[in-house]
Image (cartoon, helix red, strand yellow):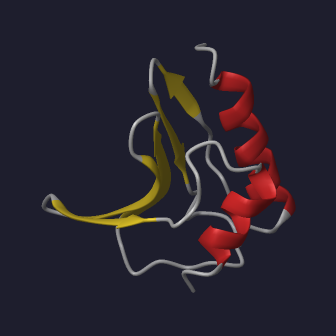
Amino acid sequence: MTTHGSYLRAVAEALEAAGVAVADWRADPGEGWIPFDRARPSVLTWDYDQAGLGWSETGGWYLLLINSPGRRVTRPLDVPSTAPPPVVVAAVLGTR
């Protein structure tokens, strides 16, 4: 786990608490990934094969939406790169 692991875990837990189904989370040096669990009920649904929340130390938070075969849509979230977890959650919920 990187120094950002606790932060990414807190965001994943805040998403779950808000009703967004999270599959897991991963923290790597300078970046992280929180895939949404499309097999469980969630307050958000996606018309994509895969969906998740990405984080980059330099680029901040973004939604990554993927349709096979390899069609990707990236939607940056308008929050600071180390925004408090409730702020990140509100930005994700605002993409409905």
Residue at the spot 71% in from the left edge and 78% down from the top edge: 43
Q: Residue 7 is drawn in which quadrant?
A: top right
Vertical arrangement, residue 32 with respect to residue 69, above or below? above
Q: Is residue 58 left or right of residue 27?
A: left
**Image spot of residue 81 (x, y percent):** 55, 45
Q: Is residue 70 left or right of residue 10?
A: left
How many dots with numbers?
0
Q: Residue 92 is drawn in which quadrant?
A: bottom right
Q: Is residue 15 left or right of residue 80?
A: right
Which quadrant is home to the N terminus? top right
Residue at the spot 47% in from the left edge and 77% down from the top edge: 46
Residues 88 and 14: in front is: 88
Looking at the image, the residue that sits furthest to the right is 17
Looking at the image, the residue that sits furthest to the bottom is 96
Residue at the spot 39% in from the left edge and 45% down from the top edge: 59
Residue at the spot 62% in from the left edge and 40% down from the top edge: 24
Residues 34 and 80: in front is: 80
**Image spot of residue 26 (x, y percent):** 55, 30
